[in-house]
Image (spheres, rainbow, N blue to C red):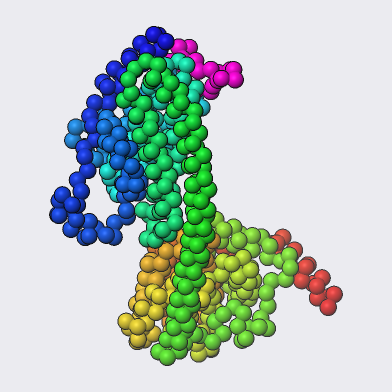
């Protein structure tokens, strides 16, 4: 008994040296009218749940907690918000020291049933909980502004100090410190994520957290009542009692409240998911309305779509596509280009008349559509009113893009509303306002490449328009949220060759330079199919 009393005295001296400053008394609104006014002005600020729990304690319990000494915060730091941090830092430091002693063989903690406890596992849990709680304090200024949580962490420190000096109680006190640190961290997580970071919180959840904090503070008061007791048998008996019945009572009470708390959390998460789903659907509704507005504006403002420009339009329904297993090498190269993030912006398929450029264009357009990659198509054709020039090129592509990517609708709609005569403007201005600006402002995070197919550019009547188009198309790369590539076919005529010469970011394939054996293979397949018909 003398040995235990001596160790208790050594521990008490060490605690007095480390925990040297009492917490300042809290001012009340009754003694200071200015504080009352400030509280009214700050009614929207989340309630201090630790203070609410403290207010529900008996006066005797409050008196005990007010005498708890906590480490002084480092110089220059705010006093209130740093008191709890200072205690937690002491907890971390003591835990590290004890684990170091354990590694060196100087600290062994035996279970009552026999065998050593896993001190490394317990130390990890305590340090992890301590860091988590510190993160909560740092993340939200309104979390524990009155530092009442410092009392609970001081109990954790109290238990760790006792394991260092009172051998007979090491197992029980380490268990007490580990459990208390863990429940403090869990409650801090719930309070931060389901109270401070939410605009609404049910009164049931708030009341449950307050009850848990009240249980913890009451346990802290009971523990520190032991600390203030006289030395000797009375202290030993009190501590032994504390490590059994009150801890079991704490665990039982907290477990009961935690069951309610986690039910509220699960319900809150479920309702929050419903709100997120509703917001997503509402956003989709708004985008759909914007798309319809864009289409209506296109019609009202004479921003018509070029008839027959789509690869699968009524006018093109009798046009050929590649037969199965033909043009396979060409189609493979085009597919690889469309799927590689390292590809050039433009793939230029060129060849003399009759080499099958449009057939390949329709085939790959269908393939892109099946893969979800097709953004728009425009098939030029001489002699057709809408397709023999570029007058409706931009509006036709813009309308297809907005149907593919609804998120572009607000930007395109804004451009039309700001400039109802946009269709009468230059190709450059149409491209900038109807395509480029909407692409630059939208945030799609699109991972799949969107391909625009333009066939027969050489059939555009105005050579100057051809030059402008070739100058504008590479600018789609300025979109950071969507990767857009252009598949373009034409004859190798001089204006087009000169246009591509000025822009190196393209890949080209010359159809009339296809190896002879590939052409013969396709002819054999074609003849075989013809004989079967």
| Residue reaching furthest to the right | 532
**Quarter of the figure with the C terminus:** bottom right
Image x and y of residue 353, in percent: 60, 76
The residue sitting at 40% across, 53% down in the picture is: 206
Magenta-span inclusion, residue 248: no
Image quadrant where residue 339 sits: bottom right
**Quarter of the figure with the N terminus:** top left
The residue sitting at 33% across, 23% down in the picture is: 229
The residue sitting at 49% across, 28% down in the picture is: 244
Magenta-span inclusion, residue 103: yes
Image x and y of residue 501, in percent: 43, 64
Image quadrant where residue 44 sits: bottom left
In-image side of 132 versus 73 (left or right) = right
| Residue reaching furthest to the top | 2
- Residue 513 seen in the figure: no
Above or below for 207 versus 508? above
Above or below for 61 versus 33? above
In-image side of 372 versus 76 (left or right) = right
Above or below for 58 versus 20? below
Image x and y of residue 427, in percent: 38, 79
Q: Magenta region's main secondary structure?
A: loop
Is 338 in front, or is 526?
Answer: 338
Magenta stretch in the rendered image: 101-119
Is 212 in front, or is 491?
Answer: 212
Is 354 in front, or is 206?
Answer: 206
Image quadrant where residue 390 sits: bottom left
Is 112 in front, or is 100?
Answer: 112
State the count of labels. Answer: 0
């Amino acid at each position: 008994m003398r040995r235990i009393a001596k160790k208790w005295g050594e521990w008490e001296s060490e605690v007095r040296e480390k925990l040297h400053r009492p917490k300042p008394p809290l001012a009340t609104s009754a003694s200071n009218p200015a504080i009352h006014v400030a509280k009214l002005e700050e009614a929207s600020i989340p309630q201090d749940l630790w203070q609410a729990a403290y207010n529900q304690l008996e006066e005797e319990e409050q008196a005990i907690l007010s005498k708890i000494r906590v480490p002084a915060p480092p110089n220059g730091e705010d006093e209130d918000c740093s008191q709890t941090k200072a205690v937690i830092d002491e907890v971390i430091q003591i835990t590290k020291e004890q684990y170091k002693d354990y590694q060196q063989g100087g600290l062994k903690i035996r279970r009552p049933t026999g065998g050593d406890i896993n001190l490394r596992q317990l130390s990890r849990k305590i340090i992890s909980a301590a860091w988590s709680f510190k993160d909560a304090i740092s993340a939200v200024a309104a979390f524990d502004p009155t530092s009442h949580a410092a009392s609970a962490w001081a109990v954790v420190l109290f238990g760790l100090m006792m394991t260092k000096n009172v051998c007979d109680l090491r197992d029980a006190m380490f268990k007490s410190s580990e459990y208390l640190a863990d429940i403090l961290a869990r409650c801090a997580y719930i309070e931060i994520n389901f109270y401070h970071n939410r605009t609404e919180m049910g009164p049931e959840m708030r009341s449950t957290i307050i009850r848990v904090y009240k249980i913890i503070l009451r346990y802290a008061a009971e523990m520190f009542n032991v600390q203030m007791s006289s030395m000797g048998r009375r202290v030993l008996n009190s501590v032994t009692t504390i490590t059994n019945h009150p801890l079991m009572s704490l665990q039982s009470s907290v477990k009961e409240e935690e069951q309610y708390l986690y039910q509220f959390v699960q319900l809150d998460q479920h309702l929050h998911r419903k709100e997120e789903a509703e917001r997503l659907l509402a956003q989709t509704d708004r985008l759909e309305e914007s798309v319809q507005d864009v289409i209506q504006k296109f019609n009202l403002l004479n921003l018509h779509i070029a008839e027959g420009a789509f690869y699968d339009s009524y006018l093109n329904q009798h046009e050929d596509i590649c037969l199965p297993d033909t043009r396979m090498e060409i189609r493979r190269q085009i597919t690889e280009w469309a799927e590689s993030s390292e590809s050039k912006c433009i793939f230029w398929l060129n060849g003399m008349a009759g080499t099958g450029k449009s057939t390949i264009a329709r085939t790959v357009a269908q393939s892109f559509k099946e893969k979800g990659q097709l953004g728009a198509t425009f098939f030029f054709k001489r002699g057709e009113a809408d397709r023999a020039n570029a007058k409706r090129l931009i509006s036709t592509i813009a309308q297809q893009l907005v149907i593919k990517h609804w998120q572009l609708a607000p930007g395109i709609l804004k451009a039309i509303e700001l400039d109802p005569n946009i269709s009468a403007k230059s190709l450059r201005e149409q491209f900038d306002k109807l395509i480029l600006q909407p692409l630059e402002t939208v945030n799609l995070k699109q991972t799949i490449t969107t391909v625009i197919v333009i066939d027969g550019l050489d059939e555009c009547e105005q050579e100057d328009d051809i030059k402008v188009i070739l100058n504008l198309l590479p600018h789609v790369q300025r979109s950071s949220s969507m990767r857009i590539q252009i598949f373009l076919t034409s004859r190798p005529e001089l204006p087009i060759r000169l246009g591509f010469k000025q822009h190196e970011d393209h890949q080209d394939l010359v159809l009339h330079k296809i190896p002879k054996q590939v052409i013969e293979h396709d002819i054999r397949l074609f003849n075989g199919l013809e004989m079967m018909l």
